[in-house]
Amino acid sequence: MFPIVPQVVVLFWAAAALGGMVIGLVCGFLFARILKLKRAHIWKDALLGGVGVFVGFVATIEMPWPENTVTTVMGDGNVLHTTMNQFQHPFLVAYIFAALLPIFHQLYRLRQSTRNAPAVSKGS
């Protein structure tokens, strides 16, 4: 195993967070438009997307998963067995979290706006 330079790890996580922020911004913008809400607080959706990447990744790593063994026959006749006890694609879950958190934020904003709306009187 070769060592990984910490600067590369920081750059990698910064790129992952930036990708999550873009996903959060787009999902928040689209859902605000679909739900006909003001797009004044759209920057919060970008932050939620960036945080969602970290939350989704850590949740996937920490969650127990049934043991899974994959057998691969290499080109030279060797057989490689790989066993994992966690989900094999944590960044898939991380980016799903980056998309879902802004969607939930927009649904919360819709609920708050309907709750705070003045009641329309009937009659008279």
Image (cartoon, helix red, strand yellow):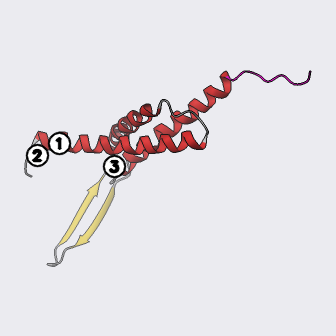
Q: Residue at x 21, y 45 (%)?
A: 12
Residue type at the position of mark 1: Val
Residue 90 - label:
none
Mark 1 surroundings: few (<14), some (14-19) or many (≥20) residues within 10 A: few
Q: Residue at x 72, y 21 (%)?
A: 118
| Dominant secondary structure (helix, strand or loop) of the stretch shown in magenta | loop
Task: State yes or no: residue 13 in magenta.
Answer: no
The x and y percentages for residue 89 are 34, 53
Mark 3 Cα shell of 10 Å, populated few (<14), some (14-19), many (≥20): some
Whether residues under marks 2 and 3 lie with C-beta atoms below 8 angstroms apart, the answer is no
Q: Image check: 102 left or right of 21?
A: right
The alpha-carbon separation of the residues under discs 1 and 3 comes to 15 Å
Give the extent of the magenta segment.
117-124
Q: Find residue 114 and report its horizontal and vertical position in percent.
A: 67, 28
Q: Give whichever of 59, 19 is nearer the camera.
A: 19
Q: Farthest residue toward the right?
A: 124
Tell which of 105 and 68 is nearer to you. Answer: 105
Q: Residue at x 35, y 37 (%)?
A: 50
Q: Name which of mark 1 and mark 3 comes first in the sequence.
A: 1
Asked if the residue at tag 2 contacts the one at tag 1, i.e. Cβ–Cβ closer than 8 Å, the answer is: yes
Give the numbered dot on residue 4.
2
Cα gap from disc 1 to disc 2, whole angstroms: 7 Å
In which quadrant of the rendered image does the C terminus lie?
top right
Q: Secondary structure at mark 1?
A: helix
Residue 75: name its quadrant.
Answer: bottom left
**Circle 3: residue type:** Phe
Q: Residue at 43% across / 47% down in the picture? A: 96
* Neighbours of disc 2 within 10 Å: few (<14), some (14-19), many (20+): few
Give the x, y percent position of residue 52: 39, 38
**Of marks 1 and 2, which one's residue comes earlier in the chain?**
2
Mark 3 = which residue? 91
